[in-house]
Image: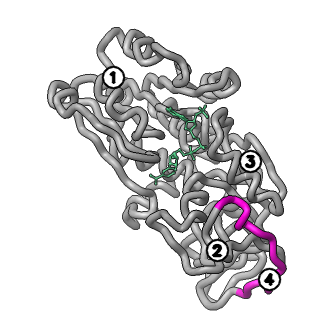
Amino acid sequence: MKAIQVHEFGGPEVLTLHEVSTPQPAAGQVLVRIHAAGVNPADTYTRTGTYAVKPPLPYTPGSDGGGLVEAVGAGVSRVNPGDRVYLAKSITGTYAEYALALESQVFPLPANIEFAQGAGVWVPYGTAFHALHHRARIKAGETVLIHGASGGVGIAAVQWARAAGLRVLGTASSARGRELILREGAHQAFDHSQEGYREQILASTGGQGADAIVEMLANVNLAHDLKLLAMNGRVVIVGSRGDVTITPRDLMARRGTIHAFTLWAVTAAEEAEIHAAIFAGLENGTLRPVVGKQIPLAEAPRAHREVLEPGAFGKIVLVP
Ligand SMILES: NC(=O)c1ccc[n+]([C@@H]2O[C@H](COP(=O)([O-])OP(=O)(O)OC[C@H]3O[C@@H](n4cnc5c(N)ncnc54)[C@H](OP(=O)(O)O)[C@@H]3O)[C@@H](O)[C@H]2O)c1
């Protein structure tokens, strides 16, 4: 089979296409034929070799994928060959024609969801659910700001928060991104590349601030977020690419809280809850993964460049 491999850490060019042997499922394992693999910003951090996650070389990147079960090992009972599935991590990596996974990493994909959409399920929707429900503990009637709403996690958070009965504010730097946010359920969209947008957000809450903020770029926004919080407000740091200085009194004055997490550290109970909520949401139409770009597998370097560029529009997926 063809697979992208990383033989040395470095820039996007280290993602190279190779012919490798197709893995076979041992007991408790599932072989999935990948129809699309999700590209996440974290894949680019890992590729540089400077991130907390540092796999042994060579490795095939990718924790998200949508496809068909090709074969199952002894003892596998939850899925059968031919089943449509999405992957939540895998043993061998999803940037490939086939990925080997544990039975516990394979989940049913409802018939109304395309494989490309299935490649944008686990990391985006898992992260958004954990941020909103497990960390911010959102409640219907509250106001949430999705700070960076046009990308994979942001769109997921918009859809989930809207379905949960919140007033949803989102930001994006492109007009296309803001249209997408509004289409997917935000009540208002703001441009985080424009001067004065924070004042507009505060004004839109009648000066009260947001009860919860889901933050995609904390190194740029965290200090300002604290001034946009309502009393007892919660900021959840999802993404950050550097250091930041904050004024703790902004938090003290609002009895505010800052939460942070990585999806890799969710508990088994939280993960089970996330997958149950994902299946229900995909099936009932609440969750509609948005695929902005489908890029051939061999062009993985391009996907890694583009996923870090401004102007996000849902997910970038790789197609073997
Ligand atoms: N904690 C975790 O476990 C976890 C899991 C998944 C993702 N993440 C992190 O969360 C972040 C978002 O992930 P993603 O998959 O949604 O990435 P993505 O699809 O590339 O989207 C990035 C988002 O960040 C927005 N953004 C850019 N500049 C911004 C700014 N100054 N202020 C606010 N938002 C800004 C983008 O908006 P425009 O393009 O419209 O400017 C876009 O909406 C990444 O940093 C990622 O590494 C963390």
Mark drawn on residue 8: 2
Residue 55 or residue 67, whichever sits in front: 55
Mark drawn on residue 240: none
Q: Residues within 10 Å of mark 2 (few under 14, many from 20)?
A: some
Q: Position of residue 214 (x, y in %)?
A: 42, 37
Q: Which residue is mark 4?
A: 20
Can you tell me whether the CB of the residue at mark 2 lies under 8 Å from the nearest atom of ligand 1?
A: no
Q: Position of residue 91 (x, y in %)?
A: 60, 77
Disc 1/disc 4 C-alpha distance (Å) = 51 Å
Residue 156 or residue 275, whichever sits in front: 156
Amino acid type at image mark 2:
Glu
Residue ID at (19%, 34%):
248
**Where is 78 relative to 219, above or below?**
below
Amino acid type at image mark 1:
Leu
Residue 260 is covered by the magenta coloring:
no
Q: Earlier in the sequence, mark 3 or mark 2?
A: 2
Disc 4/disc 3 C-alpha distance (Å) = 33 Å
Disc 3/disc 1 C-alpha distance (Å) = 38 Å
Q: Earlier in the sequence, mark 4 or mark 2?
A: 2
Instruction: Tell me whether circle 3 and circle 1 mark residues in contact (CB < 8 Å).
Output: no
Which range is magenta?
Answer: 11-24
Q: Residues within 10 Å of mark 1 (few under 14, many from 20)?
A: many
Mark drawn on residue 112: 3
Residue ID at (55%, 23%):
193
Amino acid type at image mark 4:
Val
